[in-house]
Image (tube, grey):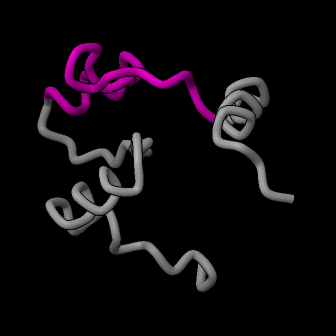
Amino acid sequence: MVMAFDYWMRYGIEQGFCGPPVCETHDGTPTSEWEAAALQDGAELCIHVIRPYVSLEHKAAVEEYHPPSTWRDDWSNQ
């Protein structure tokens, strides 16, 4: 079954798999107090981010400019 993005996102939030979407530029990276302190002290924590695209053209432009966006494309091997 293929889920629409809105349903998939709502399901993830309701199940506690993720928080709601926020704007990293304006809202900052969602962290716990411990993570914020560790980052302030120079720790290199991985905080995973998903980037919703507004169109296929937007997807192509982001992926062209940001190579890490395609580094993990082959999810079948994970």
Q: Is residue 13 left or right of residue 78?
A: right
Percent position (x, y) of residue 68? 26, 65
- Vertical comparison of 26 with 44: above or below: above
Q: Is residue 37 left or right of residue 3?
A: left
Residue located at (60% from left, 32% from top): 18
- Residue located 77% across and 48% down the image: 3
Residue appearing at x 71%, y 28% in the figure: 10
Nearest the viewer among 31 and 62 is: 62
Going by the image, does 74 lie left or right of 39?
right
Queried whether the magenta region covers residue 35, the answer comes back as yes
Residues in magenta, as a range: 18-40
Q: Residue at x 19, y 66 (%)?
A: 64
> Across the whole image, how many numbered discs are drawn on residues?
0
Q: Position of residue 38 (x, y in %)?
A: 25, 31
Instruction: State the residue lying farthest toward the right.
Output: 1
Residue 22 location (% of width, % of height): 40, 21
Q: Is residue 30 magenta?
A: yes
Image quadrant occupied by the N terminus = bottom right
Residue 29, placed above or below residue 78? above
Tell whether 51 sits left or right of 16. Answer: left
